[in-house]
Each structure stands twice: as C-alpha cells, then as structure tokens.
Amino acid sequence: MKIESKPLGPGLVLVSLDGRLDIAGAAQVEPQFKAACDEAALLLVDLSRTPFMASIGIRLLLAGAKGLRRKGGAMHLFACDPQVEKVLVTTGVDQLVAIHATRDEALAAAGAASGT
C-alpha cells in the first residue's frame, strides 16, 4: 500500500491511497495518514486505486474523520471502487464521511463546507 499527501491550499490536503487497505496496508500508511489528518482542516481522500478495504481500513478512515471533526474539519472520500463504496455504505461510513464520485465534486463540497 502506498500513500501520497499533497497540500492543495491552506488547510486543504489531498491524500491518495494506492493498494489494498487490509491489515498490512493500513499498518503501512497509518503514520502518514494520521499526519495528514493532523495537518489538514479538510482532507480529500482519493480511493480510485484502492480495490479492497477491510474493517481495519474503515477504522483508519473513521479515526481520521473523528480527529478532523473534533477540530472543526471534515473528510471527503472520492472515486471509490464500486466494491469499496458498497462496503463503506453497508457499514454506514457514508453517514459519517461524505463520499463523492469525483475529485471535482469532493473539492466543491469541501469548498462549500469551508465557506470558500
């Protein structure tokens, strides 16, 4: 599993995850993902190259979203693989973290949420 983190503006960070978000994958990316959540007010997470998500991956996302929410921020997921999106919806993650079809939709929602 690989992770890339890129600032898009003040408090706005894009994280791209590449690989399976299973036990091994989550362990590989957790430190960088947590650091991105700590740095950001709004975090966009690109899941287009994440074909599988286990419960540990869901935990990673929810822990990050909770930390962001505590400081008045938010997380937006986008470009989910259909199977990954099904898992996120089935487990209710979509009730806590916004899921968007495209990066542009996530950016628009993040802009609306931040008032920009």
Image (cartoon, rainbow, N blue to C red):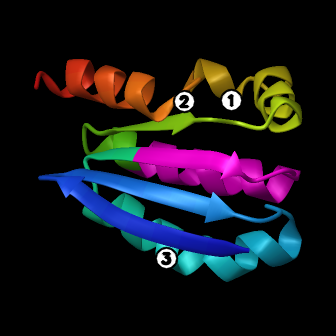
Q: Amino acid at mark 3?
A: Gln
Residue occupying the point 68% across, 29% down: 93
Residue 79 x/y as whole percent: 62, 35
Kind of residue sitting beneath label 1 = Val
- Whether the residues at callouts 3 and 1 have beta carbons within 8 Å, the answer is no
Camera-nearest residue between 21 and 47: 47
- Whether the residues at callouts 1 and 2 have beta carbons within 8 Å, the answer is yes
Q: Earlier in the sequence, mark 2 or mark 3?
A: 3
Q: Quadrant of residue 103?
A: top left
- Examine the image and state in which quarter residue 78 appears: top right
| Residue type, mark 2 in image | Val
Query: Which residue is the site of mark 1?
Result: 93
Q: Which residue is mark 3?
A: 32
Crowd tier of the residue under label 3, counting other residues whose Cα lies within 10 Å: few below 14, some 14–19, many 20 or above: some
Q: Is residue 66 left or right of residue 54?
A: left
116 in the magenta segment: no
Report the number of numbered marks. 3
User: Is residue 56 on the magenta stretch?
Assistant: yes
The span shown in magenta is 44-67
Of residues 93 and 67, which is closer to you in this image? 93
Residue under numbered circle 2: 97
The residue at the point 65 percent across, 75 percent down is 2
